[in-house]
């Protein structure tokens, strides 16, 4: 069992675990500690100790207040919906790549004896050296893997076939491999393996869902990709090194063409990330499908600010179990109607390319089944989102005096110097704005959002728009009559980002959200000269954390809050830049945002892909 999952199960059963003097201590309710649980604890004691020690260190680091008066610990719990109580799911956010690096363990799969790509071989050596310099723990292949024997029963014939492989241990964060072209005999073996898997799935499994590792063992025995050796694919990422794809990095090729190239590359190599290498350049590709390219002489920046964050916080969708589920009537929501209008108005910009159905892109059933498990049953993927924040909801005074703050109650799990509660149960924070402490109520945040995989420029009011709430915890309201077990209506990967932007705007730039605010995200950037007075951009130098993580939410929260400590007034629009991912926009008015984005696209100052990112970075460097 995954150690994270084991700790979650123990906590849910009332078992408390902590470290004292490097010893594992526990407290258990009577009758809960079974021999089976005791055996699991004994088997994973070292891993549990390491995990708890790392968590304690992270909690201490995250508890140091920032310039805005709040700590990362408090911000993470606010935007993650962890106010009421701590949870084993909650981990304090880490946004410093150097700290991320020191928490990572990776391994390099040995190169094949016949492998002859000198640029890739040289880069692999340089990469290992840079990762080591930043504190990443690099384990030799033999130490990072364990020998695993397993059998599969061939359908119809009932014959048993035994296999032995080196299985990558679940605590390894990433395996770095190189791309290899299969020989003809391997292609025949792959065809046979896939045919047998289809038969096994139909006649023995009867299409029941099984684990990723089980699927890989059944279908990948004839292949030579590193993914089949992974013990826990939800914890260990596969990174493949290969020759740079000149088409994918060609600035003259449309972003839609790059989506197709990128998806085929990820599927072909069965990797979470593919790093392209040439004599002069490095490219990096993941499911965000950015077309980021780095000069070879900037390998330090590439490793620290692009690769390390992507390994530290993988792309995963937010599970439905994180939400309190409910329903709402979209016909009674003026903001749902505004969201439909927003999407329709943006259709002409071309900023929201059509998504794709997994069944159309991933041809092999075994690969579709694996991806289906990893993406939580989503049948499609799209790029970008549109959302509309409702006005923040307050009960009582949105802001109080310092004397009133002193009379509030402390809240378990929070620093009383940052976070308190009044007699009516409303929460307040102490934050710093332009050098002065202000005491503000945490409002209830609600927004409507396009569902994952929907056509953002042609939203169906009755089936494409979900309502998200952030109070003491997360809330998800589906349109009336929609049942998640019957219909593929899942939250966007970027929910944490939407909520973080909305909450931060309510606290630090209230003029932009007081009447509600449109929020959009697309996989491109505006040029620096596109911005007008009272329009701002932040985040250019942020680490490249992917979407779907509350680290990305924290960085967006900090981006908005940073404006409150600058000489800005009457903010009309904020662009929150996410390197290697794209840009989020929030504006005070729907028509204003639409007009500005349309103008930028017409004038060539806003485009999908990374073309304009360099101008943003150059302008920041000049400040």
Image (cartoon, rainbow, N blue to C red):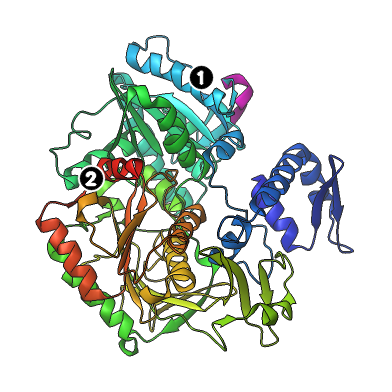
Image quarter of residue 21: top right
Q: Which residue is mark 2?
A: 612
On screen, residue 301 above or below 41: above
Q: Residue 24 at what x, y percent from top left? A: 84, 45
Q: Nearer the viewer, mark 2 or mark 1?
A: 2
Direction left: furthest residue: 602
Q: Which residue is mark 1?
A: 129
Q: Residue at x 36, y 33 (%)?
A: 274
The span shown in magenta is 141-149
Circles 2 and 1: CB distance less than 8 Å? no
Q: Residue 32 at what x, y percent from top left? A: 83, 61
Q: CA distance from mark 2 to mark 1?
A: 31 Å
Label 2 CA crowd tier, 10 Å (few <14, some 14–19, many 20+):
some
Could you tell me which quadrant the C terminus lies in? top left
- Direction from residue 392 to residue 591 in the image, left or right: left
The foreground one among 129 and 356 is 129
Residue 346 visible (yes or no): no
The foreground one among 211 and 615 is 615
* Label number found at residue 322: none
Q: Residue at x 24, y 29 (%)?
A: 245
């Amino acid at each position: 069992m995954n150690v994270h999952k084991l700790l979650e199960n123990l906590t849910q059963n009332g078992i408390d675990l902590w470290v004292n003097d490097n010893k594992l201590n526990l407290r258990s309710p009577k009758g809960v500690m079974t021999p089976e649980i005791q055996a699991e604890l004994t088997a994973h004691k070292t891993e549990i100790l390491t995990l708890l020690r790392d968590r304690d260190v992270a909690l201490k680091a995250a508890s140091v207040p920032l310039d805005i008066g709040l700590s990362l610990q408090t911000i993470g719990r606010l935007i993650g919906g962890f106010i009421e109580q701590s949870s084993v799911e909650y981990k304090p956010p880490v946004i410093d790549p150097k700290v991320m690096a020191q928490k990572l363990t990776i391994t390099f799969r040995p190169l094949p004896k016949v492998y002859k790509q000198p640029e890739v071989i040289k880069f692999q050596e340089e990469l290992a050296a840079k990762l080591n310099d930043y504190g990443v723990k690099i384990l030799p292949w033999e130490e990072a893997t364990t020998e695993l024997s397993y059998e599969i029963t061939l359908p119809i014939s009932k014959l048993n076939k035994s296999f032995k492989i080196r299985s990558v241990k679940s605590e390894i964060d990433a395996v770095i491999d190189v791309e290899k072209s299969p020989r003809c005999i391997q292609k025949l073996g792959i065809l046979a393996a896939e045919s047998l898997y289809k038969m096994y799935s139909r006649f023995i499994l009867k299409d029941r869902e099984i684990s990723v590792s089980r699927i890989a063992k059944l279908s990948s025995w004839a292949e030579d990709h590193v993914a089949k050796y992974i013990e826990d694919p939800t914890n260990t990422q596969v990174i493949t090194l290969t020759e740079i794809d000149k088409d994918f990095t060609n600035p003259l090729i449309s972003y839609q063409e790059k989506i197709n190239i990128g998806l085929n590359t990820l599927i072909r190599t069965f990797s979470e990330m593919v790093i392209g290498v040439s004599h002069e350049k490095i490219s990096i590709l993941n499911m965000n499908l950015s077309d980021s390219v780095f000069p070879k002489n900037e390998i330090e920046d590439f490793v620290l600010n692009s690769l390390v964050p992507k390994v530290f916080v993988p792309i995963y969708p937010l599970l439905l179990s994180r939400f309190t589920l409910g329903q709402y009537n979209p016909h009674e929501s003026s903001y749902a109607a505004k969201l439909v209008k927003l999407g329709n108005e943006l259709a002409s910009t071309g900023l929201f390319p059509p998504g794709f159905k997994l069944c159309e892109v991933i041809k092999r059933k075994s690969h579709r089944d694996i991806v289906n498990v990893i993406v939580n049953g989503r049948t499609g993927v799209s790029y970008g989102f549109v959302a509309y924040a409702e006005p923040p909801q307050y009960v009582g005074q949105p802001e109080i005096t310092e004397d009133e703050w002193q009379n509030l109650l402390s809240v378990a799990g929070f620093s009383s110097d940052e976070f308190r509660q009044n007699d009516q149960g409303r929460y307040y924070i102490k934050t710093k704005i332009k050098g002065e402490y202000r005491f503000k109520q945490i409002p209830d945040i609600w927004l409507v959002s396009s569902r994952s995989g929907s056509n953002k420029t042609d939203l169906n009011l009755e089936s494409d728009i979900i309502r998200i709430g952030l109070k003491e915890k997360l809330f998800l309201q589906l349109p009336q009559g929609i049942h998640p077990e019957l219909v593929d209506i899942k939250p966007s990967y970027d929910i944490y980002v939407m909520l973080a932007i909305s909450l931060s705007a309510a606290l630090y730039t209230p003029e932009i959200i007081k009447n509600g605010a449109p929020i959009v995200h697309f996989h491109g950037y505006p040029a620096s000269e596109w911005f007008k007075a009272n329009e701002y951009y932040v985040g250019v130098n942020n680490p490249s954390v992917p979407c779907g993580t509350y680290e990305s939410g924290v960085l967006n929260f900090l981006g908005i809050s940073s404006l409150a400590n600058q000489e800005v007034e009457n903010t009309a629009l904020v662009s929150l830049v996410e390197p290697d991912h794209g840009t989020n926009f929030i504006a005070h008015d729907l028509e204003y945002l639409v007009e500005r984005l349309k103008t930028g696209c017409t004038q060539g100052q806003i485009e999908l892909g990374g073309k304009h990112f360099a101008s943003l970075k150059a302008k920041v460097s000049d400040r």
